[in-house]
């Protein structure tokens, strides 16, 4: 479960990183892509929280 | 109103037919509309109706901007973008992706493969003309 979430987070990090790279290179970043990158960050946050929740549950069970 | 706007636009714009815009679109009606937009901007349009011929045209003519439909009969927009970016001649060409699909996967896929702009279809002529002009004059320069 945790491994799958980590893989998902890794995939979702791609878009925000590309957005930051474009901005740092002084390239134009359309709003639609900026919004998509932000959405990916929200999703990463949600997945991270979910993962932490999973780990806490596991600790409780042990 | 449209006539007035069109006249105003063509009077103020520097017409440069040497600037080539490549349209990769399988729908003939949409392709004609994009051609009209390119024509209003004063540029020359090249049209391809599938991905492979679009890539060939891009390599041979070095267009200043590529207008790409995401759903093509032989491949999807992300695959076309990947192939364009892998070739030396077209690695940095600006690409505007247009699609009827509005889900985030398509937008992110286009973005990750190097698209410079994304629009959902249908797009009106006025917006398209503005965007072509913006991409050719501001982003590309």
Image: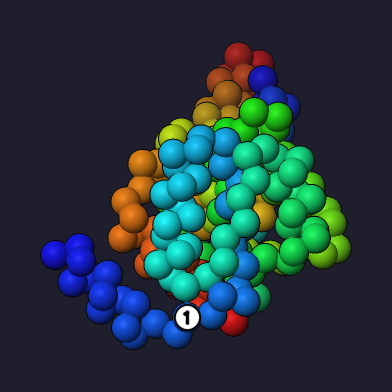
Report x, y in % for residue B50: 67, 37
List x then y, in percent, for residue A54.
Answer: 58, 24
Give the residue drawn at x 57%, y 36%. Answer: B26
* Near-viewer residue (B129 or B81): B129
User: Which of the two residues, B54 or B94, is positioned nearer the viewer here?
Assistant: B54
Residue A34 visible somewhere in the drawing: no
Which chain is disc 1 placed on? B
- Check disc 1 and report the residue beneath it: B15
Label 1 SS:
loop
Does any portion of residue B121 appear in the rendered image? Answer: yes
Q: Residue at x 63, y 39 (%)?
A: B49
For the C terminus of chain B, which image quadrant? bottom right
Q: Check disc 1: other Cα within 10 Å, few if <14, some if 14-19, many if 20+.
A: some
Viewer-side residue, A7 vs B44: B44
- Taking the image as shown, residue B95 lies to the left or right of residue B137, namely right
Residue B29 found in image quarter: top left
Q: Residue at x 73, y 57 (%)?
A: B58
The total of numbered circles placed on residues is 1
Q: Answer with left or right where residue B127 lies relative to residue B31.
A: left
Residue B81 position within the rendered picture, expressed as x and y whole percent measured from the top left? 70, 48
Q: Is residue A60 above or below residue B11?
A: above
- Give above or below for A54 relative to B105: above
Residue found at x 51% / y 35% = B27
Image coords of residue B56 (percent x, y): 79, 50
Q: Quadrant of the N terminus of chain B?
A: bottom left
Colour option used? rainbow
Of all residues, the one furthest to the top in this rendering is A61
């Amino acid at each position: 479960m945790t491994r799958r979430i980590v893989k998902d987070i890794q995939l979702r990090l791609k878009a925000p990183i590309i957005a930051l790279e474009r901005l740092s290179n002084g390239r134009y970043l359309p709003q639609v892509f900026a919004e998509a990158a932000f959405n990916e960050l929200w999703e990463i946050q949600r997945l991270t929280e979910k993962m932490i929740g999973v780990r806490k549950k596991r600790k409780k069970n042990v | 109103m449209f006539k007035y706007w069109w006249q105003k636009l063509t009077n103020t714009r520097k017409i440069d037919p040497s600037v080539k815009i490549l349209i990769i679109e399988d729908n003939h009606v949409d392709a004609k509309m994009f051609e009209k937009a390119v024509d209003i901007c004063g540029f020359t349009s090249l049209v391809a109706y599938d991905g492979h011929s679009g890539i060939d045209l891009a390599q041979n003519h070095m267009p200043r901007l590529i207008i790409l439909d995401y759903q093509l009969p032989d491949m999807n927009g992300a695959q076309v973008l990947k192939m364009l970016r892998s070739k030396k001649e077209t690695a940095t060409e600006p690409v505007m992706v247009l699609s009827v699909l509005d889900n985030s996967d398509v937008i992110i896929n286009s973005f990750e493969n190097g698209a410079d702009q994304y629009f959902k279809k249908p797009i009106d002529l006025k917006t398209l003309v503005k965007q072509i002009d913006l991409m050719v004059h501001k982003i590309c320069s």
